[in-house]
Image: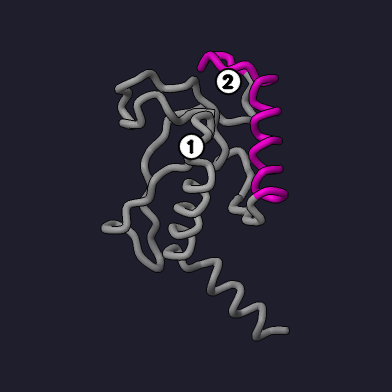
Amino acid sequence: IIGEFEASTRDELDFRKEAANAAACAALFAAEPRVHVPATDPSLSGERVLTMEWVDGAKLDDPAALLAAGVQPAEVAPLLTATFSAMVFEHGFVHCDPHAGNLLARRMPQAGARDGRGGGGGG
């Protein structure tokens, strides 16, 4: 069991795998404009470093910040539930570390917004 734990821990600490998983998750939700997985930068990433795009948003455990960002907390819960359900029941691929530091909400960016997705992203 120690060998299995060691291998699992090494996998979890290899940020190249984390980047690949993020790309796979982004591809699964590419058609859902309300879900955005931050892009990774392979040229600035490696086994021990993961560089991702910066995304402004409010933490899900901060109702005041959500409201200040123009996000209704009651609108976030169904999207979050549907997204995780789709990962489990439709895609069979779950990529997550669901704590408040990793899950943000924001208003949908407008066309031509800074992230270049032309109105996509947000959630």
Residue 63 position within the rendered picture, expressed as x and y whole percent measured from the top left: 64, 21
Coloration mode: one colour
Identify the residue at image location x=57%, y=38%. 103
Badge 2 amino acid: Leu
Residue 47 position within the rendered picture, expressed as x and y whole percent measured from the top left: 40, 68
Q: Residues within 10 Å of mark 2 (few under 14, many from 20)?
A: many
Q: Which residue is mark 2?
A: 66
Identify the residue at image location x=62%, y=25%. 62
Q: Main secondary structure of the magenta part?
A: helix
Q: Residues within 10 Å of mark 1 (few under 14, many from 20)?
A: some
Badge 1 amino acid: His
Give the image quarter of residue 82: top right
Between residue 37 and residue 91, name the one nearer to us: 91
For the magenta stretch, what is the residue range?
Answer: 64-90
Q: Quadrant of the C terminus?
A: top right
- Pointer 2 or 1: first along the chain: 1
What numbered label is drawn on residue 36? 1
